[in-house]
Image (cartoon, rainbow, N blue to C red):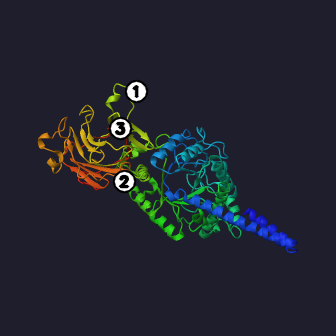
Amino acid sequence: MLKWRFRSKRLCRLGACDLYSNRKGIVQMKKLMRILIVTVTVSLCVGAIVEVQAKSDAVGKGVKAYCIDFNWGEGGPNAFARPGLWADADPKEHVAWYKSLGANVIQTFAVSCNGYAWYKNGVVPEQPGLKHDFLAEMVRLGHKENMKVMGYFCVASNTRWGQLNPGESYGVPADGHIPLTKEYNKFFTDSVKDALKKTGMDGFMIDWLFHGPIRNTKIKWLDCEIEMWGELMDGAFPGKSKVTKAQELEFARRSVDRCWQSIRRAAKSVKPDCIIWLSLYKLKHPQVVNSRVIKEVDWLMNEGGTVEELGKIRKELGRGNLINCLAAWNKADPREVVPASIEAGFGLYGFTKPVKGSLLPSIDDYYLAKDIDDLAGDEANVAMLARAYRGITSGSVSLFNGRDLSGWHVDVPKMDKNPDVKSPFIVRDGMLVSLGSPGGHIITDAEYSNYRLEVEYRFAGKPGNCGVLVHASTPRSLYRMFPKSVEVQMMHKNAGDFWCIVEDITVPDMVARRGPKEKWGIVEGKSRRIKNLTDDSEKPAGEWNRMVIECVGDSVKVWVNGDVVNHGTGCTASKGQIALQAEGSEVEFRKVLLTPVKKSGGGNR
């Protein structure tokens, strides 16, 4: 646009002087017009592409965001964390936690509410004792995991600013306290530009974009605000006692609008495709309702957590890129809000302060290991978001975390006396792989009862043999290899057979499916196989199969790719560990998902 203005003025000057005085001037005029048209067209196209990319890249895939919140904590002059609290936060550990959550957007901090930065060598002093160049490292590591990394700034609250500029602050409460003066706007936008340049963050959240206290407009009319009146309002300041409520609100709205325009202009001048993310506890707050910021911001979040309010905004403004928030304070029920938000096409976000050093507990070992009904507040929110982000049905637990074999142990007889024998169970490309040899089992550390187990598997090479063992207990009870259990066969073209391993189970048509009764047994040399009901439920070799095993009470029911292939009752065990076999063929497992089932239920696949 700067080029366009320059060339337009030049065109006018040339036209006034001599462009039309001769044929040469006319030719020159045509050339300049072509330059002008191309310049404007390219500028508009590039701008449109940048804007579309910025707004659609993560949102188009569904925003799955979270924030380990460094704002709130102990030791400060208010409810905000003292400077330097959590300054030892390790970016590697944090990115690993967000990855285990299943997030595709990390919201962390450029400057937190105590007024100190989370990156080094910036215009804002860093958190005292900051061990790592935290935000810059979060960006670098997050990008390696294909996650967007967003910073954070709070507009109306900054403890350090209030302490250094008492004449431009309503003290330093943990509330909105900063008049949005020209001086403050410059400080704020300089901070934004600096963080964008030095950290490479994809964008940033702006919070508390209000003038004064966030819950209501009660302006104190400091000297700096009276000066702002002359800048923003029509006419002279009428006096503190004569300002009407309507005038007070209009002043606040103009103050917020000026601040927003400064932020947007500064951010886009440094990084045109940066994402500006506005969080509002109340989408129709009087200071911002029907304002430019609501229409222009890249991402808009309802911190109040209601799906209905976001739906109204989408309908009224016709805008997308809307995000819903789960937080303990808004008391939104994650069991209702998460599925409703996904159904409506809204992104999801949550936040809570650290409770384990600078982090939160393990996703796999804590949040997914517990039933959501046993959790409350932010713990329930994290547990529900983890299930949604990772595609886990509510109440389900992934027994394999996609990274390592935590929660499992290996039992391979050949490894007992020969340390050079390698385990046949590995993690490869996010999958649990049974290499098939040497023979043995990988067994869960925990026991389970009354559950539905969903396993997605395929033979990586030539199809052969493998199996899932349920209700496993005493190791090496059969042939000094197999744990006491009931095996659900995965052998190619026999998937769904039962094999009794020192445990027993009964099915209809026992003689037809198990053979002569006198040969039945559960130990070596006995007829232990119970044939499945179909032999054509498996997919061709190399394709993914889905096996579901439902164990409720003394019943075991099996589906393969949607077909019921076996159903037995009277099982001699009703709880135990779960095991996968190494039995000759290489098998890849991309899902091992367990969902608790109430004993009185029965369940569906």
Contact between marks 3 and 1 (CB within 8 A): the answer is no
Tell me if label 2 and label 3 are in contact, CB under 8 Å: no
Image position of 164 with respect to 250: above or below: above
Q: Which mark is residue 436?
A: 3
Give the residue at x 49% y 39%.
357
Q: CA distance from mark 3 to mark 1?
A: 17 Å
SS of the residue under disc 1: loop
Farthest front residue in view: 462
Give the mark nearest the N terminus, 1 or 2: 2
Q: Is the C terminus in the top left, top right, bottom left or bottom right quadrant?
A: bottom left
Three-letter code for the amino acid on which mark 1 is drawn = Asp
Q: Is residue 434 above or below residue 112?
A: above
> Residue 394's mark?
2
Q: Which residue is mark 1?
A: 420
Give the image location of residue 516, x and y in percent.
13, 44
Q: Nearer the viewer, mark 1 or mark 2?
A: 1
Tell me the CA gap for discs 2 and 3: 33 Å
Secondary structure found at label 3:
loop
Query: Please, what is the three-letter code of the amino acid marked with disc 2?
Result: Ser
Give percent across and percent down for residue 392: 39, 52
| Amino acid bearing label 3 | Gly
Q: Nearer the viewer, residue 368 or 358?
A: 368
